[in-house]
Amino acid sequence: MTEARNAIFFVKPKDRTAWLNRARRDPRVSHFGFRVAFMIAEDTDRSGTLSQKPIEIAGRAGVHLGTLMTALDTLARLGYISFERGGYRQPSKITMLPIASKCARQRDIA
């Protein structure tokens, strides 16, 4: 049931904005990491998923593929996205992860 809720989390633009604001304020996210997060938020479908080859994303961002992969790995490690690499000549799957509610964060702290 929680997976069904996560699948429709990013239908509303205000949820995408909250996700981007969280990334923008996080000191662990580099400037380029935020640019990648913005591109992901802009290009994902209604469920918050983007299926595209990383080389295409790197081309749009105007950076080397290695730089993009570092940013994607960092965003995944920090919990902003889930990143599944595609096979040979197959697109990778990038999914925006929902922001934990304040109640859930307080339970984790306690």
Image: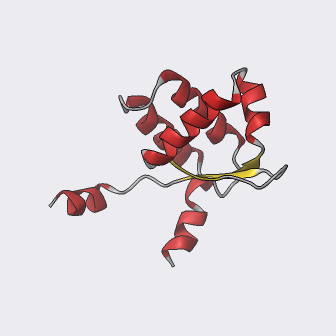
Residue 28 image offset from top left, x and y in percent: 38, 32
Look at 46% across and 26% down and name the residue there: 30
**Any part of residue 49 in sight:** no
Residue 37 image offset from top left, x and y in percent: 57, 36
Looking at the image, is 88 positioned above or below residue 38?
below
Residue 50 image offset from top left, x and y in percent: 71, 49
Looking at the image, is 34 positioned above or below residue 80?
above
Pick the quarter of the image with the C terminus: bottom left
Residue most extreme to the bottom = 1
**Coloring scheme used:** secondary structure
Judged left or right of residue 58, residue 103 is: left
Residue 84 image offset from top left, x and y in percent: 64, 55
Look at 77% across and 55% down and name the residue there: 87
Look at 55% across and 59% down and name the residue there: 9
Look at 74% across and 54% down and name the residue there: 86
**Any part of residue 102 in sight:** yes
Judged left or right of residue 88, residue 37 is: left
Quarter residue 58 falls in: top right
Number of residue marks: 0
Residue most extreme to the left = 110
Quarter residue 42 falls in: top right
